[in-house]
Image (spheres, rainbow, N blue to C red):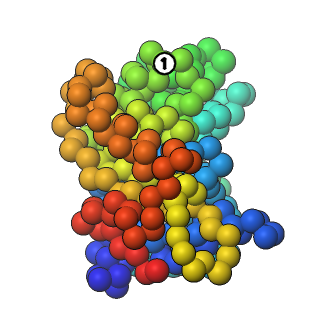
């Protein structure tokens, strides 16, 4: 099954461990994500969500285990993995258009950039149209709201055409109203483009609302016979329906019930489910342990 998933799916991790000195953070992570999935990752503070994301990007190396994109083992960061952070990645001295153009031009030599400047500019304008910022192309970042700055950062990433878009708490610094607007915007963009998203968030409600698949990473579980202090594992893997037209779904009884279930599975230190009882019912879930 593992080889089939590695061949079929876009992102595939096997036996990934990460330690810092004698502290084990990630404990045997097995994960396979299909192209087109909107995969959200939630878990208690300090469980290693951002560490997992950095390993997939290539900013950190796993202590052991392998990460594959399209069946090929990944190394250092490259354009196949785009990234949007919580803190805006925009250059303050560049306009909106120049910031998005930079994301495209840096991938090419100076000669290629010079020859294809008009083509790149047309692509940047089309991307800014898509993220609803065509009327703001000559503004500088300080002239934009926080939500608009994040839309520029998303455009800056998407213009490089990554195979997977990695997002690390991208809306964490925004006010609640702006955050909900950006959530809906991102879902619309995901459906329109058909992109694959790996979205890390500390906000459980956001993770359930956005994802087609919800990964719960947690250090709160029990096991016997372990030879080392355990770190975080995937303790639950939920398949979520995705037919969201508004944020009203957040007030539905089913939505609230799922939030409570996930809190028990991964966020409650008093509720230590056994490793054999993990909810790994998603069709692409697997475990090598």
On screen, residue 87 versus residue 203, left or right, reads: right
Residue 112 % position (x, y): 56, 58
Residue 151 visible at all: yes
**Marker count (numbered):** 1
Vertically, is 114 above or below 24?
above
On screen, residue 150 versus residue 207, left or right, reads: right
Residue drawn 24% across and 66% down? Answer: 283
Residue drawn 67% across and 76% down? Answer: 228
Q: Residue furthest right?
A: 21
Asked which quadrant contains residue 111, the reply is bottom right
> Is disc 1 surrounded by few (<14), some (14 to 19) or many (20+) residues within 10 Å?
few
Nearer the observer, 94 or 48: 48
Vertically, is 248 above or below 163?
above
Residue drawn 31% across and 39% down? Answer: 258
* Element carrying mark 1: helix
Residue 282 % position (x, y): 27, 62
Vertically, is 176 above or below 169?
above
Asked which quadrant contains residue 146, the reply is top right
Quadrant placement of the N terminus:
bottom left
- Residue linked to disc 1: 176
Nearer the observer, 251 or 37: 251
On screen, residue 242 versus residue 18, left or right, reads: left
Residue 247 % position (x, y): 30, 23
Residue 161 visible at all: no
Residue 100 % position (x, y): 54, 38
Residue drawn 51% across and 45% down? Answer: 267
Nearer the observer, 254 or 167: 254
């Amino acid at each position: 099954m593992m080889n089939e998933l590695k061949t079929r799916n876009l992102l595939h991790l096997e036996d990934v461990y990460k330690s810092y000195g004698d502290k084990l953070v990630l404990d045997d992570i097995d994960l396979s994500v299909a192209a087109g999935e909107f995969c959200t990752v939630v878990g208690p503070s300090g469980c290693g969500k951002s560490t997992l994301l950095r390993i997939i990007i290539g900013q950190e190396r796993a202590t052991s285990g392998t990460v594959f994109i399209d069946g090929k083992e990944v190394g250092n960061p490259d354009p196949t993995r785009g990234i949007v952070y919580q803190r805006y990645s925009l250059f303050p001295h560049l306009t909106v258009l120049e910031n998005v153009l930079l994301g495209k031009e840096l991938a090419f030599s100076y000669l290629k950039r010079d020859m294809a400047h008009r083509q790149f500019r047309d692509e940047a304008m089309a991307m800014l149209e898509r993220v609803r910022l065509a009327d703001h192309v000559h503004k500088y970042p300080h002239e934009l709201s926080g939500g608009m700055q994040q839309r520029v950062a998303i455009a800056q990433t998407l213009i490089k055409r990554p195979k997977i878009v990695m997002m690390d708490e991208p809306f964490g610094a925004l006010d609640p109203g702006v955050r909900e607007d950006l959530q809906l915007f991102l879902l619309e963009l995901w459906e329109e483009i058909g992109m694959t998203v790996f979205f890390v968030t500390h906000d459980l409600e956001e993770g359930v609302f956005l994802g087609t698949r919800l990964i719960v990473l947690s250090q709160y579980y029990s096991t016997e016979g372990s030879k080392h202090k355990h770190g975080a594992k995937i303790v639950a893997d939920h398949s979520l329906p995705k037919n969201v037209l508004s944020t009203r779904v957040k007030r539905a009884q089913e939505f609230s019930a799922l939030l409570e279930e996930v809190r028990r599975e991964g966020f409650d230190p008093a509720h230590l489910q056994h490793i054999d009882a993990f909810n790994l019912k998603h069709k692409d879930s697997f475990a090598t342990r």
